[in-house]
Each structure stands twice: as C-alpha cells, then as structure tokens.
C-alpha cells in the first residue's frame, strides 16, 4: 500500500499522484501547486467543499462545514 496525502487523505501510489511527481512529497497533486508546494488552507477548503458538494449532493454551505471538520483531522491542517 502507498502513502496517503497528509492534506486530504487521498491514497498515493504512482509518481504522478504525488505533488510535483515527487514520491517523497507528503501531499497529492490535488493539494499542491505544480512545483509540489502545498496550496493554502483557503484554497483547499474551497476545493474540498466543492468536491463534497458535488459527490455528496450537499448544498455548498453544508459541504463547507463538513469540509472544515474533515480537514481538521488531516496532519497538514491540525489547528485550523
């Protein structure tokens, strides 16, 4: 089994799934800029909210609340 993104929890196995295609990166391609650096919390919250709204058929405000709770469980966002 591969690593899990410390920002969103996505499993990462293939090099193209890791931020910057660097298999030592703790974050996936969805959570990083093209160079592999972690996106801002606000940007991640917006993306996770949109993803949850679409995949769980939730109103955006409800998805945002749920995304905040979920992201707070990730090592990258502890204390947010």
Image (spheres, rainbow, N blue to C red):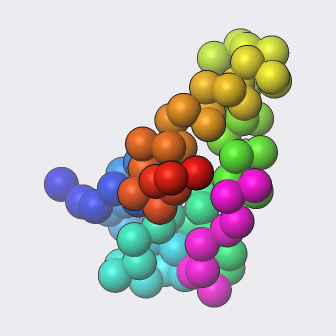
In this view, which residue lies farthest toward the right?
60
Look at 70% across and 65% down and name the residue there.
40
Label total for image:
0
Principal SS element in the magenta part?
Answer: loop
Image position of 36 with respect to 47: above or below: below
Towards the viewer: 4 or 21: 4
Residue 15 seen in the current view: no
Residue 53 seen in the current view: yes
Q: Quadrant of the N terminus?
A: bottom left
Left-right relation of 71 to 59: left
Look at 81% across and 24% down and name the residue there.
60
Q: Residue 79's spot in the image, x, y percent?
A: 50, 52
Left-right relation of 41 to 19: right
Look at 28% across and 61% down and name the residue there.
3
In this view, which residue lies farthest toward the left?
1
Q: Residue 28's spot in the image, x, y percent?
A: 50, 64
Q: Residue 69's spot in the image, x, y percent?
A: 54, 32
Look at 80% across and 15% down and name the residue there.
59
Image position of 48 with respect to 79: above or below: above
Left-right relation of 74 to 41: left
In this view, which residue lies farthest toward the front?
79
Image position of 48 with respect to 6: above or below: above
Residue 30: within the magenta? no
Magenta range: 35-42
Towards the viewer: 6 or 78: 78
Image position of 15 with respect to 64: above or below: below
């Amino acid at each position: 089994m591969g690593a899990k993104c410390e920002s969103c929890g996505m499993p990462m196995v293939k090099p193209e799934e890791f931020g910057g295609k660097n298999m030592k990166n703790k974050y996936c391609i969805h959570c990083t800029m093209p160079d592999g650096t972690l996106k801002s919390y606000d940007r991640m919250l917006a993306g996770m909210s949109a993803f949850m709204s679409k995949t769980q058929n939730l109103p955006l405000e409800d998805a945002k609340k749920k995304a905040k709770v979920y992201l707070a469980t990730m090592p990258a966002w502890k204390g947010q």
